[in-house]
Amino acid sequence: MDFGLGKVLPVRIEDEMRNSYIDYAMSVIVMRALPDVRDGLKPVHRRILYAMHEAGMAPNKPYKKSARIVGEVLGKYHPHGDSSVYEATVRMAQDFSTRYLLVDGHGNFGSIDGDSAAAMRYTEVRMSRVAELMLADLEKETVDFVPNYDESLKEPSVLPSKIPNLLVNGSAGIAVGMATNIPPHNLGEVIDGVLMMIDNSEVTINELMTAIKGPDFPTGGLILGTEGIFSAYNTGRGVVKMRAQARIEIMSNGKPRIVVTEIPYQVNKARLVEKIAELVRDKSIEGITDLRDESDRKGMRIVIELRRDSNPDVILNQLYKHTQMQESFGVIMLALVDGRPRVLNLREVIYYYLEHQKEVITRRTQYELAKAKARAHILEGLRIALDHIDQVIATIRQSQTTDIARNALMESFDLSEKQAQAILDLRLQRLTGLEREKIDEEYKNLLETIAWLESVLADGQKVLNIIKEELTEIKRKFGDGRRTAITIDTSKIDMEDLIAQEDIVITLTHGNYIKRLPVDTYRSQKRGGRGVAGMGTKEEDFVEHLFVTTTHHNIMFFTSRGKVYRLKGYEIPEAGRTAKGTAIINLLPLDADEKITAVIPIRQFSPGKFLFMATKKGIVKKTELMEYDTARKGGLIAISLDEDDELIGVKFTNGEQHLIIGTRDGMAITFAETDVRSMGRTARGVIGIRLNKVDEVVGMDKIKRDAEVLTVTEEGYGKRTSTDEYRAQGRGGKGIINMKVTEKTGRVIGIKVVKPGQELILISTEGIVIRMDVDDISVISRNTQGVTLMKTAENDKVASLAAVEKKSGNE
């Protein structure tokens, strides 16, 4: 018959790929990646424990080399790589990976810092006491055995597993097209849940959750809220939020520190410390002065020392947000049920475990009953022999061979072959009266045992009672307290709830260095004063923007390229009065040629509000504020600009205000906001003021009733002019004269609409700051050069101005 040997058979590649991939997928799903719902083990873990059991590596026996057990597993049951077997063995011996250790390891088995275990030729292992429970009664035919890979040996298809291991130790694995990720739980709680189901087969998941509170990780830590737990237990899928256990302490020197004693499950401690250090270096988190890992054999201890004036709660929240001090565990309770993968809820997992235990107890009882009956049968024969001892001896003496004697005994006393053989094997010392009593006593006890075992098989409730008794004893011996506490989910609390709302000054230099300071940092002076040092700058750098806001405002940063970024006031690092500040590039992802040209604070994004923008080339645009209510790390397009244009100003409006635009050559135009229709976020805008070739817009503001237009020049001259002198014109005109610009005054650097009672802050290119009452500045007409507001040194010029609300008292 020709089977096609030696021939090449054409096959469609899509058919071969489909069939082969299905075979591969099923092999991975059933034989490698997913645990069995009954014992919670994958094949590799089951084979490791069985091989250790067969090798006599009990908890009370000496340790043996890991390489020995790896070789046993590879050679007899698991024809895969030795590294996978050893890694599985190591994980079962790591107290930071496995909640209840199944392998008792001796030597270096790695660390929570990510250090790998020593080579298998150095480490030693044996079964743990909990692993003994997994294999208990294996020899009593409690589970089915199947041929190994080459059919030379038999191995168990599942372990008896007295403990509900799938929940207790959890499991993780990636199969083909599916994955499992089951968290570990507290043994005592899980046993309480199983007992609840034994007592009430209709128990609900909510009732089970009164016993099983949630996952219990070997590394401790905190679980935030029960929403994820509830979802996982009801649907088999959910997300559990984990958080490090940390406390805030005050050191003897009065400085605060954060001490971390537990971290989330599966987090690498060394990488966590490195990440915190990186955030400090990048100034993403301000206020940390020292970071040490003081962990030792007694436990974990990461110390984070803080500045005296820092807010520890805020820094701790930032650590939770930006590091693995807070992590999520995605629960997928997927396991094999009758060889098929299924996503199970909590009740189903316990149900299948209980069904397995009922089968194990039943099969163990059947085994013990058969053994007891076999022994009783032998004892019955011995009792008959002892009752007729003289005849038995005579029969044996008259027989020429053992076979003849056996057959004679069977015929004379109606015995079975096994009974007759037992009599022939009987030693003479058993013929004494004392031995006869022992046989009678043993027979009596066996009859009672048989009656009990038969009653167990006849009554399912007795099987459940046995399971209850065994589980209660296991809980007494191995139960322990929870390591992972379950708390309210405080991660939903907004960080600004922890931060006091305070007025702050934000300064931004030409070189894009930013900082925040309390608004009282600058003291009030008389007009014409020399000022105080407001910040340290490099010779080529100078303060270009100064803004007053609060710690809780959303700060919108508009850039020269027409983009907008968003930060909270408290997210801008605080610095001393003379400090340079933080490079804005550390806070916002600006391009090399992109700089901040406008900043406005927004309390909240609400309808009916607008952002009004002006560009250097006189283009204006009005857009609804709600169009910017999207916080993207990469920023949003605020306005589409021409190639040679820049965004210079943005104002927050109600859509019906009047605005004034001032230019560098002293021109200004006032028009109603209604003259500009609302446009989309990415629109270009329309002409606001027509400029000559060398002129450009330097400021824009909203017109207010009973206010004045403050104009300041680069040589320190300035004036106030009543807004009544600026008649409203149509949008797009050339405007009117705002200030007489001369060589003495220098060109205009900015305009502001101010009201009596406010204060003016001026900053020079050398970083000199002066603060004065607005009321001290003369109110004069438009076409004048103004008065001296700030005496500038040689090569120094006024760079920026801001109007703030007046504070009582001086600094």
Image (cartoon, rainbow, N blue to C red):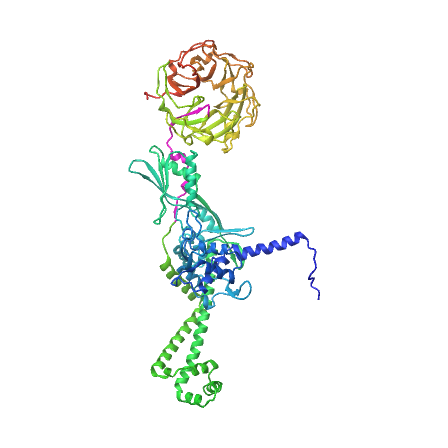
Front-most of residues 611 and 61: 61
Front-most of residues 279 and 111: 111
Compared to residue 620, the image places residue 92 above or below, namely below
**Which quadrant: the C terminus?**
top left
x, y percent for residue 311: 36, 34
Question: Picture quarter containing residue 303?
Answer: top left
Q: Which residues are magenta?
A: 484-511
- Residue 502 seen by the camera: yes
x, y percent for residue 475: 37, 59
Front-most of residues 795 and 421: 795
**Which quadrant: the N terminus?**
bottom right
Compared to residue 412, the image places residue 648 above or below, namely above
Residue 500 on the magenta span: yes
x, y percent for residue 757: 38, 17
Which residue appears farthest toward the left when viewing the image? 252
* Number of on-image labels: 0
Compared to residue 367, the image places residue 347 above or below, namely above
Residue 88 on the magenta span: no
x, y percent for residue 444: 38, 77
- Residue 204 seen by the camera: no
Q: Is residue 536 left or right of residue 614?
A: left
Question: Picture quarter containing residue 361?
Answer: bottom left
Compared to residue 441, the image places residue 604 above or below, namely above
Which residue appears farthest toward the front when viewing the image? 121
